[in-house]
Image (cartoon, grey):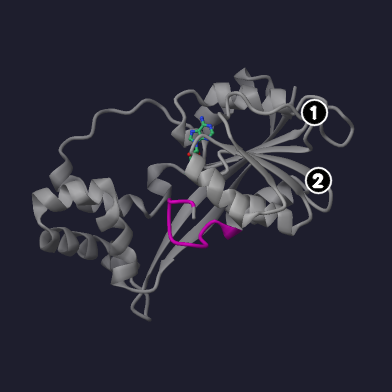
Amino acid sequence: MSGEGPRGWGAPLYAAVLDATAVGPGTSVLDLGCGSGLFARAAADRGARVTGIDTDPAAVGRAAAEVPEGAFAVGNAQDPPPGPFDVVAALQLLMHVADPAAVLAGMRRAGQGGGRAGSGAVVAATVWGREQECDVRVFGEALAPWLGPRPPSPPSVTDPDRLREIVQRTGLVVERLDEVVCPFEYDDEDELLGPLFESALGRSVGRRAGPVALRAAVLQHLQPYRTAAGGYRLQNLFRVLVARPA
Ligand SMILES: C[S@@+](CC[C@H](N)C(=O)[O-])C[C@H]1O[C@@H](n2cnc3c(N)ncnc32)[C@H](O)[C@@H]1O
């Protein structure tokens, strides 16, 4: 799983990337920061030949198990394997690296000589939307009383203007920047709260607030997202960037 939400949430995002980059039988795809291989699985299911790298050896092991027909290795997205590839993808990676421009430049390099006409692979990346565009911010709002003031954060790739500016600096031309809404669905309170209580942040706040107060605060903030069936549904916006070499 992606570690970012409930199992299966990424399916619409993967489909949007695969559609926008026209992945089909025989397309060669490089998946940077492949995680557990769920996007790679979706690409392989369309007949693509997938190569994936991730800095986390455990994730690489899970990806190899998820997509036995793929080729996976431990590696840094800033130094990707040489292509040529038709598509160079990085899903939910750019927010997690210190230098997103270096990753995008690496993606452009990995795509050199690739693509259908040899003019360079299509580059695709996904990012979270802005905080106000994603209902998951409500978890942070619930925990805020125990977290203290947040330090000001520098402009991030979740800001579409900032993302466009970084991309253009790396010698890529933005072809499209689409928006995809991915619902995070939880069947019940346990499914909603379990991952939070298991996370480092949840454990830390739980020690300070006590588990009962933490549970009450989260459930109160998430009340507006309750479904008639007793579950929870959070709508989160993601952006799909598609770019080509200049
Ligand atoms: C949020 S997960 C996304 C995983 C997967 N792409 C997905 O969408 O489900 C981010 C992944 O990027 C990996 N990662 C972080 N920095 C990286 C880097 N510099 N090079 C390659 N992988 C990296 C992490 O180990 C993690 O598996």
Report the residue marked by disc 2: 27
Number of the front mark, 2 or 1: 2
| Left or right relative to 213: residue 129 | right
Q: Quadrant of residue 41?
A: bottom right
User: In the depicted view, which residue is nearer to us: 234 or 6?
Assistant: 6
The residue stretch that appears in magenta: 2-11
7 inside magenta stretch: yes
> What residue would you read off at disc 1?
120
Q: Residue at x 28, y 55 (%)?
A: 198
Is 36 left, or right, of 109 in this rendering? left
Q: Is residue 98 visible?
A: yes
Within 10 Å of disc 2 (Cα), the crowding (few <14, some 14-19, many 20+) is: many
| Residue 179 horizontal/vertical position (percent) | 57, 48
Q: Say whether residue 216 is magenta.
A: no
Residue under the point 56% across and 21% down: 102
Q: Mark 2: which amino acid?
A: Thr
Mark 1: few/some/many CA within 10 Å (<14, 14-19, 20+): many
Q: Which residue does the image show at 52% across and 62% down from the upper left?
A: 8
What amino acid type should be assigned to the residue bearing mark 1?
Gly
State the residue in front, 133 or 11: 11
The picture places residue 238, in percent across and down from the top left corner, at 52, 48
Secondary structure, mark 2, is: loop
Position in image of residue 143 (x %, y %) = 20, 50
Front one among 41 and 232: 41
* Residue 83, position as x, y percentages in the image: 76, 30
Spatial CA span between label 2 and label 1: 14 Å
Residue 128 visible within the image: no
**Which circle's residue, 2 or 1, is located before the other in the chain?**
2
Q: Is residue 203 above or below residue 229?
A: above
Q: Quadrant of residue 188?
A: bottom left
Of 49 and 201, nearer the camera is 49
